[in-house]
Amino acid sequence: MCRPVRIDRITVRRDRIVCEVSVPDPGMRCTTPILSRRALDFYPTLPHHACINEKGRTFGAVIEDTSVPHLLEHMIIDEQVRRSSCDAASFTGTTRWIDEDAGAARIEVSFADDLCALACAKEAQRRLNDAMRRCFQ
């Protein structure tokens, strides 16, 4: 099965998970309006996430033109919020390219429960790959 986005390794730290991510195909490394809409089918609250970026104060300002690993970061966070038993749950994350030419990125996301965070990363990756396969076929 084709996986446009791979989580190659996850390290659990005291307060966050660190995901080493690869997007091998250069044509699939950036979001598009179509991919963004597909992601919103699963996670309709993504545009409302707080996000430090060059275009605005929310993820919605960049969702249609950002790195796919950045989208995955926000999907992992959204999945954790959904599964949290605390109404005031708050999660933070960062994404950066380790080697953009090779499609290698590092995502760091805070968590309340490490096992839940691992399951959320896996689910977000599955949903993102499903959305990408439908967009880029």
Image (spheres, rainbow, N blue to C red):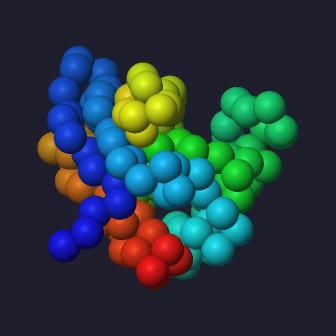
Instruction: Check the image and report above or below for 80 versus 15.
Output: below
Position of 22 with respect to 74 (left or right) is left
**What residue is rendered at 73% in x and 33% in y?**
53
Is residue 24 visible in the rendered image? The answer is: yes
* Number of disc labels: 0
Instruction: Residue 32 in the image: state x and y as whole percent.
Output: 66, 63
Query: In this view of the protein, which residue sits in the foreground, 39 or 44?
Result: 39
Which image quarter is the N terminus in? bottom left
Instruction: Check the image and report above or below for 90 versus 17.
Output: below
**What residue is rendered at 35% in x and 54% in y?**
5
Query: In this view of the protein, which residue sits in the foreground, 92 or 85?
Result: 92
Which image quarter is the C terminus in? bottom left
Instruction: Residue 135 in the image: state x and y as whole percent.
Output: 52, 77
Instruction: Residue 33 in the image: state x and y as whole percent.
Output: 70, 68
* Among the 4 quarters of the image, the one containing residue 112: top left
**What residue is rendered at 18% in x and 35% in y?**
9
Which residue is farthest top? 14
Instruction: Check the image and report above or below for 18 versus 132.
Output: above
Is residue 87 visible in the rendered image? The answer is: no
Position of 129 with respect to 17 (left or right) is right
Position of 122 with respect to 24 (left or right) is left
Instruction: Check the image and report above or below for 54 versus 25.
Output: above
Position of 11 with respect to 97 (left or right) is left
Query: In this view of the protein, which residue sits in the foreground, 3 or 115?
Result: 3
* Among the 4 quarters of the image, the one containing residue 38: bottom right
